[in-house]
Amino acid sequence: MDIAASIFLVLCLGSFAWGSRASAVGIRHTLFVFAWLCVALAATLVVFSVFPSTTADGTVLGMTLGGAGAFVLLLWTTAVRAGNLAARRDTYEAQAARRVEAAARRASADAQRATPAVLVQQKTHWFQLKDGAAKGPWVGVVTGDLRAVRGVDVWVNAENTGMVMARVHDFSVSSIIRYEGARRDVAGHVLHDLIAEELAETVRDRRPVAPGSAIVTSSGALAESHGVRFLVHVAAVEGQPGAGYRPIRDLGSAVARALAAAAAPGFTEPARTILFPLLGAGSGGASVEATAERLMAAVVDHLKRGASPRLERVLVLAYTDAELAACLRVLAMSPDLVRRRRGPT
């Protein structure tokens, strides 16, 4: 008797332990019914072994039973009824768990789709301004990291109205230009902050500048490493204490000023190529779609008017697949542009 009671007690504890695990979803309640049945059987064996004269009578399915058998059968029928209820609960619990898991998978898939993928390979998608001779200036979308771009005369830097460049360890166009344009030692430490210092000296006490202002500086070390002749710093975002940065309202005028600055007199040779980031779509938090529309519209309008006749190529940087898709959609819908399989030679 004692051995049998011990066995049932062990089975009870094992069932409780198993049913408490997260993997027991769908069978948890059935396991608990079995565990309580084992407890009852163990208790019955102990009671009738210690008190053998104990009696129990009952009628089950039209039959009258007495002694320990009646007590065990009574417990068994009760357990069967509880087991049926537990099975229904297990079914509901399993269905709920599957719904939660499916919802989690959908949420994960939505999050992955919503997270733009960084474009590693550099490729340029070309469009050309329509004219009678099909020799109009080119508009291109270049993919990938800014640091991989070579041979463009002018880089446009998306800056704030304070004209204070981002720290070199920040993740922005401004920080990349600042670091790549600085003089550094062999360990990569900045020795001379060329571009940031020149920008500060140029602006001096005129901070903050008006939204959309375009300030020209040299390109520092970028001239040697990337072939950049000079930079145009555009006040594309404005800051507010406690609220961060927001994009300026008139992005089109900022783009026009940058293009005009690149063609301004005072340089030995006006720029023939210029590269824009999506101004204000980074730390400024502007919509990529809206920024692409406004930037491209300003570029096409400037080129159509012939405002910079020496300008041959206007490039826009697309760092992610979302930026690339937005730029290509806008350019493909422009009635003034035609897509080309091959770029300019």
Image (tube, grey):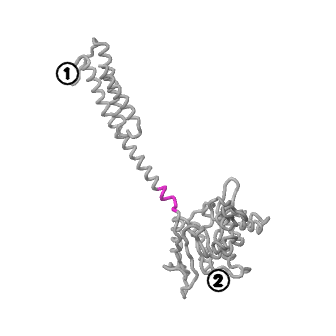
Foreground pick, 4 / 97: 4
Quadrant in the picture for residue 140: bottom right
Compared across the picture, whether 111 is left or right of 2 comes to right
Q: x and y percent of residue 221 in the render?
A: 68, 70
Q: Mark 1 points at which residue?
A: 63
Q: x and y percent of residue 41 in the render?
A: 31, 23
- The relative height of residue 235 versus residue 334 in the rendered view (above or below) is above
The residue lying at 60 percent from left, 74 percent from top is 150
Q: x and y percent of residue 328 in the render?
A: 52, 71
- The relative height of residue 92 versus residue 241 in the rendered view (above or below) is above
Foreground pick, 266 / 333: 266
Foreground pick, 21 / 132: 21
User: Quick one: SS at disc 1?
Assistant: strand
Magenta stretch containing residue 112, yes or no?
yes
Q: Residue pushed farthest left?
A: 63
Magenta stretch containing residue 140, yes or no?
no
The residue lying at 57 percent from left, 77 percent from top is 139
Which amino acid type corresponds to the residue marked 1 in the rendered image? Met
- The relative height of residue 283 versus residue 14 in the rendered view (above or below) is below
Q: x and y percent of residue 186 in the render?
A: 66, 64
Which amino acid type corresponds to the residue marked 2 in the rendered image? Arg
* Residue 236 can be seen, yes or no: no
Quadrant in the picture for residue 22: top left
Q: In the picture, which quadrant includes the C terminus?
A: bottom right
Compared across the picture, whether 61 is left or right of 176 comes to left
* Residue 8 can be seen, yes or no: yes
Q: Mark 2 points at which residue?
A: 310
Query: What's the magenta region?
Result: 110-117
